[in-house]
Amino acid sequence: MVAATETPALNSRAQTEIDNELEALEERMRALRTRRNTFSPISSIPPEILGAIFVHHAQQTQLLYAPHHPAFLSWLNVGHIYRHWREVALGTPELWATPFLNSSQATEMLLRSKMAPLNLRTGLRYCVVSVQSALVHIERLQEVSISFFNGDIRRCIMEFLDNVSSCSAPKLRSLFLKQESAQTPRIVIPISFPAPNLCSLQIRNFDISWTSSVLTGLTVLEINNLSRKCLPTLDELISALRRMPALHTLELDDALPTLPPQTTSLPCTPRALNV
């Protein structure tokens, strides 16, 4: 005969044993569902192709939404369909190469991206620590697009530009830097800027020397609101344009030379400029 004081303990033990059995059954069901899914037509797609599809989907989603929009990361849902898709997603570094810079999630995404070329984009909101941790991967940067007001991120940008000038950004193809306030002290693009594959440079409320190596081989150049001390002479502007023979998009707003009042015509150039 069981004593009344022992009954609660026995009941608790019985419930624990049943819970363990239920957990084992649930795990068995998950394993069976995974096995069943392997016989579906979509499971015959090789992981490399499936990963490429995921990357394309993520890129299209990121083109539709600004980096601060909640839907910017809606492509993550592909990893919630079933286990195989999640494994493919986690094993595709390119899928994580545009880290979400609004939060600390960027750290995990940077790890998952391994050595894939990085695309960094900020929106109206960003986490300074995430931006800083991403910008240190200079050798992997492919696109950098950052708009900011002031504060800690300003120091991150200055450190990034200094680091590029002292080493190299071999994969960098596009650089967009926008300082929202024209009243903030200007950040200067270094004269030495070794980015041999850079095609597009867009800056606003930044300063730049017209002899900078960054003004070489570009196809897109947009400069908005230079300080007066950095406005080019006409000769400096023409010399810079000659170093960009494939240039097809040029926008200079408050960045043109001021011609002397007595100027009646512009000098002839030795050859036509492709602008």
Image (spheres, grey):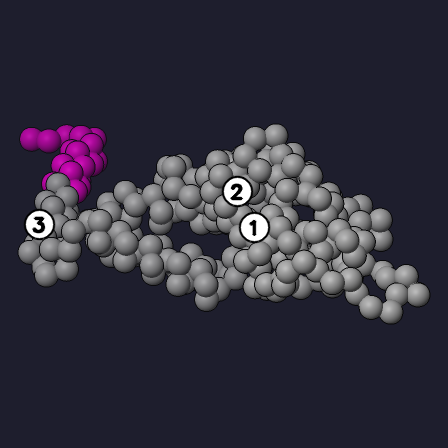
Residue denoted by label 1: 217
Separation (CA) of disc 3 from disc 1: 54 Å
How far from the left and from the top, in percent, is residue 245? 57, 56
Q: Main secondary structure of the magenta part?
A: helix
Q: Quadrant of residue 128?
A: top right
Q: Earlier in the sequence, mark 1 or mark 2?
A: 2
Q: Amino acid at mark 3?
A: Arg
Q: Quadrant of residue 162?
A: top right
Q: Residue at x 81, y 54 (%)?
A: 233
Q: Quarter of the image containing the C terminus?
A: bottom right
Q: Amino acid at mark 1?
A: Gly
**Residue 173 or residue 4, whichever sits in front:** 173
Q: Residues within 10 Å of mark 1 (few under 14, many from 20)?
A: many
Q: Residues within 10 Å of mark 2 (few under 14, many from 20)?
A: some
Q: Does any portion of residue 40 appear in the rendered image?
A: yes
Q: Is residue 77 left or right of residue 36?
A: right
**Residue 216 or residue 120, whichever sits in front:** 216
Q: Is residue 129 left or right of residue 154?
A: left
The numbered disc on residue 35 is: 3
Q: Residue at x 93, y 65 (%)?
A: 262
Q: Quadrant of residue 41?
A: bottom left
- Circles 1 and 2, Cβ within 8 Å, touching? The answer is yes
Q: Which residues are magenta?
A: 1-23
Q: Is residue 242 above or below residue 171?
A: below
Q: Residue furthest bottom?
A: 264
Q: Earlier in the sequence, mark 2 or mark 3?
A: 3
Q: Residue at x 17, y 34 (%)?
A: 13
Residue denoted by label 2: 196
